Amino acid sequence: MNTIRQRILVLVAALACLSPAVRSEQPQKISRPSQEDRIKKLEERADAAEKTAGSAAMEKDYITRTQKQYESYYQKVLNTQMWTLGIMGLILTGVFVLVARFSLKMIDEQTKTATAGATVQMRNEYARALAKEVQKLCDSNATDIKRLKEALTAHVAELEQSLKTRFDFQIEFLQGLAGVVDEEHGDTVVTFRKALSTYKSGKLLNLIETKVGATTVLYIFESLRKTHTENYVEKTREELADPLYKGLEEELALAALQSLWLAPLIAERSPARSAQAAPEPVGEPRSEAPTSGVVPADPDLPVGEESDSCRLLKT
């Protein structure tokens, strides 16, 4: 556009310079009308070119303004979109954070709930298992305690029975010894029989020594001999036939060793022993036996023998 203006200005200056020459040559001008027409045409063309240049400049300015407007508009739109996208991004980020936090909170709550449920279930199962084991242990302990109680009760009863047997035997034996001292031989036989019965009840448990049982048997027969001085042999046989002496063979044997007159009668009671040992005839001469036996025929028993009996009772 500036180039066209410069050309127009150069053209105008050239015309101004040539104007005096044109005026001086008026006649020539008339003769040359075609030159002026050419100049006019040139001017018209220059005006047209100037107008065209002006319109082109206006169009260029319009295009430039329009382009700048569009550029500013698109820049604004771009900025708006960028801000919109930024805000949307922030909103989405916030929503994502909230959703993630809520999800994590929900997962945490579900985990806690599941853990609490599992813990409660495990506690319940452990409590049930513990209750079963405790019940089993209680039942086992109750059974053991009952068994121990029964065993202890039986043992205590056995001890009580043993003590009662020993005490009863000692009382009855001492009563028999008192009867021997008082020479009440009839009551003495009954008392010693009770003592022998008590001794026999505790024989299986070995509560009383066999020597004490043999001494009791000896006292019975000695008291019987002193009570029935004439027919003591028949009374002794009747006494030996009593079921009380069943199972007391050892005691009878020990008693026979201490009394010579009693040994043949005890041998008669045992057929096996009488077949092996030669029995002595039992008759009237047997009245002399008490004088030669260990236990004399005197109404009073030796003091040493009573002392031995008391010593056996103490042991």
Image: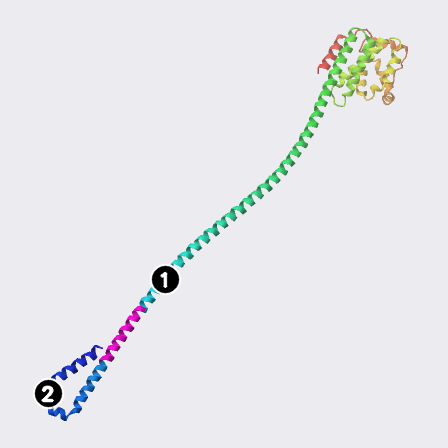
Pick the quarter of the image with the C terminus: top right
In magenta stretch: residue 68: yes
Residue 82 numbered tag: 1
Q: Residue at x 44, y 52 (%)?
A: 98
Position of residue 32 in the picture relative to residue 85 (left or right): left
Q: Where is residue 294 in the image (x, y as percent from the top left)?
A: 80, 11
User: Looking at this view, is 285 or 26 the one in front?
Assistant: 26
Task: Determine the residue located farthest toward the right in the rendered image.
Answer: 283
Q: Residue at x 33, y 64 (%)?
A: 76
Q: In this view, does 29 lie above or below 104?
A: below
The residue mark sitting in front, 1 or 2, is 2
User: Looking at this view, is 133 or 62 the one in front?
Assistant: 62
Q: Which residue is drawn at 30% across and 71% down?
A: 66
User: Looking at this view, is 24 or 165 the one in front?
Assistant: 24
Look at mark 2 in the image and give the residue it sits on: 23
Question: What's drawn in magenta, residue-wise?
Answer: 50-69
Q: Where is residue 245 in the image (x, y as percent from the top left)?
A: 83, 19
Position of residue 140 in the picture relative to residue 48 (left or right): right
Q: Is residue 124 visible?
A: yes
